[in-house]
Amino acid sequence: MAKLTFLGAAGTVTGSKYLIEAEGKRLLVDCGLFQGLKQLRLRNWDTLPEKPSSFDWCVLTHAHLDHTGYLPRLVRDGFRGPIYADAATIELCNILFPDSAHLQEEDAERAGRRGYSKHKPPLPLYSQAEVEPVLKAFREIPRSDPFTISPQFTVRPHDAGHILGSASIELTITENGKKTVVLFSGDVGRYDQPILKNPEAPPRCDVLLCESTYGDREHPSDSPEDALADVINRVSKRGGVIVIPAFAVGRTQTIMYIIRKLEDANRIPRLPVFMDSPMAINVTGLYLRHHEDHDLIFTNEEAGGNPLDAHTVHYMRTVEDSKKINDVRTPAIIISASGMATGGRVLHHLAQRAPDRRNAILLAGFQAAGTRGRSLEEGAKTLRIHGEDVPVAAEVINLRQFSAHADKSELLRWLTGLPAPPRQTYLVHGEPAASAALKSAIESNFRWRAALPAYLQTVDLDA
């Protein structure tokens, strides 16, 4: 009996982990960190209900840490199998994991030095040394062709259009001669967006796991170019600085691309743009190298130079470079990680710039419950940063146009591409209200069976 256990992303957006069992073999699809609310983050420290040493393989949909960031902990706790992913995802993880470990070590050291942690001493979830065995375990699989992991499991990626290398995973399970196809949507991207191709139409499947991040809402219909131009012009005229907490993978590159387009069209002033994230700088290089993911428009634009460079961009690689931004007193744009303001260099910029009403904080994507980004989105007047309360007087703007996740209509559009109804649909990777709304829409539009799985629930895939 083939089984599926939801080890994460059930009733929440983060922590994607799905365990598939067939003929005594165990495959893990994604292995992400829980983020946001404290009760979710504490799950990262809990012992998994299944022993990592009992897992035979892991396959990844894409590189974002809520889908991959638990891997160092998994390997530390006994997992010894190969980790399968496409080339771009592997290269991104080689950048993301050391950075994630470094930030955790840095935060733990600062908390211990300043005494604002309850733990004595505060520890990182994993260290940089614990990242090395993970990177050695990666194995490349084809970008879109079938790949047989074992007699029980064959995977085939389908372009998800979310970030570089992102895929929906078609998993064919063979048990006692019977085949069952399970489709993991991963994070479904948006249609007609810059840089990347549209999401590929999903294949026929028996069981579907579909993300539901924005299952209860639509993104604004006005163009991201118009929205960003309005913010930059408004804030620069009053002498302010725009701080953009941006995901290093995907969001930073999209924002830079649009800034460049607006500058070329003389729609905004050519302000100093500080890319203050070594990870984002390195990821941008990968975005330019992996042509297989580019849409035709971006491919043509590359012929005229680097379309991901603003005209006055400054790449701030070192801590000393980052500190120099503190001296900037003229209008400027600071793009820095993390995207939900949960850590990283952006916290220093928020601490310095948030109290000044001339400035603006531009949120450019989903802000999970329990994050500083969500607090800003909900109108917080103070932020707790490095053990201190920072007043927020700056203008806070959320441009949902920049989201890399499909909204409700786009998810329904993607689902319409299925050649036939799945036998069962599970809605994952969404907060409860979003998943419930998408469930209702699927049932009313398609008359399919849809369910909201619970954390740690196990289901029979043959039922």
Image (tube, rainbow, N blue to C red):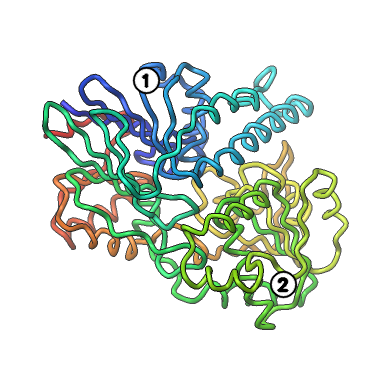
Residue pushed farthest right?
Answer: 327
Q: What quarter of the picture does the N terminus occupy?
A: top left
Q: Is residue 433 visible from the viewing direction of this image?
A: no
Pick the front one: 436 or 287:
287
Q: Circle 1 sits on which residue?
A: 49
The residue sitting at 60% across, 71% down in the picture is: 303
Which residue is tagged 2? 235
Horizontal and vertical percent position of residue 250:
55, 55
Regarding mark 2 in the picture, which secondary structure is present there?
helix
- The kind of residue on which mark 1 rests is Pro
Quarter location, residue 152: top left
**Of helix, strand and loop, which one carries label 1?**
loop
For the residue marked with disc 2, what is the amino acid?
Val
Residue 174 position, x and y percent, is 18, 32
- Decide: is 200 above or below 156: below
For the image shown, how many numbered marks are present on the structure? Answer: 2
Q: Can residue 255 be seen in this snapshot?
A: yes
Mark pair 2, 1: CA separation: 50 Å
Q: Which of pointers 2 and 1 lies earlier in the amino acid sequence? A: 1
Picture disc at residue 159: none
Tell me which residue sits at (57%, 73%) in the image: 301
**Residues packed near mark 2 inside 10 Å, few (<14), some (14 to 19) or many (20 plus):** some
Residue 416: which quarter of the image?
bottom left
Q: Position of residue 247 (x, y in %)?
A: 58, 51
Q: Nearer the viewer, mark 2 or mark 1?
A: 1
The answer to whether residue 259 is left or right of residue 222 is right
Q: Nearer the viewer, residue 24 or 151?
A: 151
| Image position of 279 with respect to 127: above or below | below
* Residue at 32% across, 31% down: 149
